[in-house]
Every structure is written in structure tokens, then in C-alpha cells.
Image (cartoon, grey):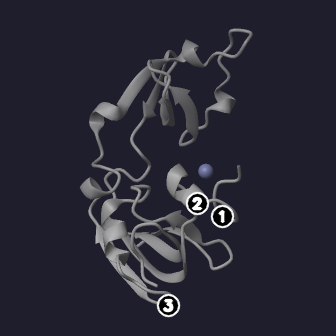
Amino acid sequence: MKIENNKVVSLTYKLSNHKTGETIEETTTENPMVFLYGVGSMIPEFEASIDGKKVGDTFEVVIVSENAYGDFDENQIAMIPLDVFNDESGVFDEKYFPIGSLIPMSDNEGNQLRGRVLEITPELMKMDFNHPLAGTDLHFIGEILELRDALEEEISHGHVHGEHGHQH
Ligand SMILES: [Zn+2]
């Protein structure tokens, strides 16, 4: 069996920042990444790099930021009035908004997004809505652990069920 559409892939990988070599994320054999191949849930170049691989094969790919999580966009930095963050009693409490933390927000259309707190002034909070990996060139190395045929139900849902998958 090889990796192609409608296969469920289990793999481990180590993701590092290609420029600095810093490790960003690492999966283990106990807690691998499991996904349905070919439905667009992964970065396209990542999927392309494992196309046709078999269990035990290794892979390595570098994906530049514009093909991964996008370039860093200055327009995604916003100044937001502090009173937006007031608690129920109308008070802004800085201790809930440490610099660097990610705050769940929603935009005008109700989409969920997370903003990183950059700076707090007496009236404004400066937030960064870029993806945390925007502007980062990604370097993946990994190994294919398991392959199986996807179930009809998984194919129709577009995701994996069971252990490491959607529980529903
Ligand atoms: Zn499902």
C-alpha cells in the first residue's frame, strides 16, 4: 500500500524553522499525526512530499512561508480599543492579557480568530492576527508509520474517525 487519495496516513514529524533551525513542533510514535490524504487538510507541498510513500519511508521537505502559512502581513496588526476587553463589570484587567498571549476573538462576520497581544497602552491594545507561523519557512522531516484504506464514512466526512481522529 502506498500513499494516495483516500488513504489514512499516520506519521511522525519534526517541524523546524528552516532559517534558524529552531524546533517548532515534534510528534511522537505514541501520538502521531493521523489524517485523510488528499482532501486538502494539509499544506499542499507537504502532501506532495509524501505522495506514493510506504510504511517505513522517511520524508523531508522545506516549504517557504508563502506556500505554508503566508508571509507576515503588517495589515494584520491592529490597534483595538481597550474597552472591547472589559469584563462584565466594565473594567479592563491587564492580568488576563499578558504580552505574547493568544486571545480568542471573532471578526465582523463571526469568524473565530486569535490575536497575539503585542503591547498595551492606556487606551489601546496592539494585537497581531497573523498566523503564528506566518513568515516562517518550514522544514519537515518525518517517517510514515501506518497506512490504511479510509472508511466510506471517513471519505464522505472528509476526515479520520477513531483514535487520533474525530470522535463523533
Ligand atoms: Zn466524521
Amino acid type of the residue tagged 1 in the rendering: His
* Cβ at disc 3 under 8 Å from ligand 1: no
Which mark is on residue 56?
3
Foreground of the two, 135 or 144 = 144
Which mark is on residue 164?
1
Q: Secondary structure at mark 3?
A: loop
Nearest-to-viewer mark from 2 and 3: 2
Q: Mark 2 and 1 residues: CB-CB less than 8 Å, in contact?
A: yes
Q: Residues within 10 Å of mark 3 (few under 14, many from 20)?
A: few
> What residue did someone put label 2 on?
160
Find the residue positioned furthest to the right. Answer: 89
Query: Is tag 2's residue or tag 3's residue first in the polypeptide sequence?
Result: 3
Q: Residues within 10 Å of mark 2 (few under 14, many from 20)?
A: many
Residue 114 in view of the camera: yes
Foreground of the two, 148 or 129 = 148
Q: CA distance from mark 2 to mark 3?
A: 21 Å
**Whole-percent x, y for residue 109 in the image:** 44, 20
Find the residue positioned furthest to the front. Answer: 152
Relative horizontal placement of residue 142, taking residue 27 as reference (left or right)? left
Vertical arrangement, residue 159 with respect to residue 22, above or below: above
Nearest-to-viewer mark from 2 and 1: 2
Amino acid type of the residue tagged 3 in the rendering: Gly
Q: Mark 2 and 3 residues: CB-CB less than 8 Å, in contact?
A: no
Query: Is tag 3's residue or tag 1's residue first in the polypeptide sequence?
Result: 3
**Whole-percent x, y for residue 99 in the image:** 55, 39
Foreground of the two, 100 or 146 = 146
